[in-house]
Amino acid sequence: MMFLWCVLVLVNLVSVATDTNAGDKVRITQKGLEYGRQIAIASIQQKLRTIQLQDISGTERVKAVGKVQYSFTGIQVVNLGLPKSALRLVPGTGVMLSIDNAYINLRGNWRVKYFRFIRNSGTLDLSVSKLTVSTTIAITSDNTGRPMVSVTNCAATVGSVNVKFHGGASWLYNLFRSFINKALSNALQKQIETMYPDLMVKLLVETVKEPLVTFEPNNMTVQASSTVTAYAIQPNSTLSPLFVLNLEGSVSAHIYVTELKLAGNVTLNKIKMSIAKSYVGPFQVAFLDTIFTVVLRVAVLPNVNARLQEGFPLPAIGKMQLVNSQLQVLKDYLLIGTDVQFNG
């Protein structure tokens, strides 16, 4: 889910950066895709480490023993690896993330009862190999043009499962190992696929107060505060809030006059993100904070600066045209000096 939010944030920020010119286009390079893949894998690894399989219990008839009641509980991840992964564009849809040859090692407890009165328990080690996961993320927009993302497809395939039992009547489980392997494999596959709920996600960015503009010699600083609210769009179109973030940002601007145009460029000073409220339990925002900073530096600000450097024409006052204009940023104010030319 974290990767899903990051994709939406990236799309939303890039769309804002290019909104000043409807003819602008954003091209995602191979380097950009590689960066996205790294973000996705880090997010998925973090999510996979939190997997805890639901407890499994049931009854199985075993030769020479009869009916055996069994249960597996507290199965958690102790190690995992995602050695091969790829992120590619899907024309007209969005992006697809695929993972191959992944492995996961889990550990848990087992308990068994047979002959109606004999009880035994112990621990188990579960090794999963040749695990593949693929998910397609579609990028769309609502009727106001606000970007949205959704998972249109998520599939997981467990290649092989090997279970080792320790303690107690471990020999008994070995008598119906194939049944156990299949049950645990299905449980793990289901758990991985539910990591990506089939819901669209929408972001609402709101300014909480007027931006603060300060002037120092040869420098102008703009500080802005906003909130970012993420919503899951339910099948009946209602919005369910996921979390609210506080976002504090600061940029420095260098402005100047060139060829009768006001132009400039901006640089990022800092950005700080904090969790205001979560409806999905606690999570760390440091990962998103880093992503926001990188996205702003490499995707948003270059587009903003490209537009600023094109400049904005200085206004004409009636029949007077401003010429030889100069601009200085001084403490607490801007000083504009100019000649005027009368066009009769």
Image (spheres, grey):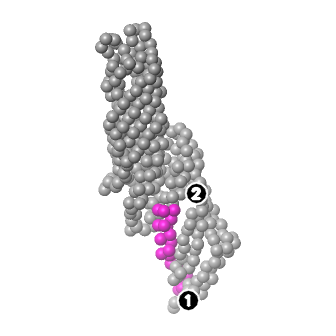
Q: CA distance from mark 1 to mark 2?
A: 44 Å
Per the image, is 222 magenta? no
Tell me if residue 154 can be seen: no
Give SS at disc 2.
strand
Q: Nearer the N terminus, badge 1 or badge 2?
A: 2
Give SS at disc 1.
strand
Task: Tell which of 251 and 315 is nearer to you.
Answer: 251
Q: Is residue 2 left or right of residue 209?
A: left
Q: Position of residue 18 (x, y in %)?
A: 44, 64
> Residue at the spot x=53%, y=49% of the render?
287
Magenta residue span? 297-321
**The N terminus lies in quadrant:** top left
> Residue at the spot x=35%, y=39% of the render?
131
Q: Is residue 20 above or below residue 156?
A: below
Task: Tell which of 95 and 59 is nearer to you.
Answer: 59
> Residue at the spot x=60%, y=67% of the render?
252
Q: Are marks 1 and 2 in contact (CB under 8 Å)?
A: no
Q: Quadrant of residue 19?
A: bottom left
Q: Nearer the viewer, mark 1 or mark 2?
A: 2
**Residue farthest to the bottom, as pictured:** 344
**What residue would you read off at disc 2?**
271
- For badge 2, the amino acid type reads Ile
**What residue would you read off at disc 1?**
341
Q: Is residue 332 above or below residue 98?
A: below
Q: Position of residue 335 (x, y in %)?
A: 65, 78
Q: Is residue 185 above or below residue 67?
A: below
Per the image, is 307 magenta? yes
Q: Position of residue 94 (x, y in %)?
A: 35, 53
Q: Quadrant of residue 173?
A: top left
- For badge 1, the amino acid type reads Gln
Is the residue marked by circle 2 packed among few (<14), some (14-19), or many (20+) residues within 10 Å? Answer: some
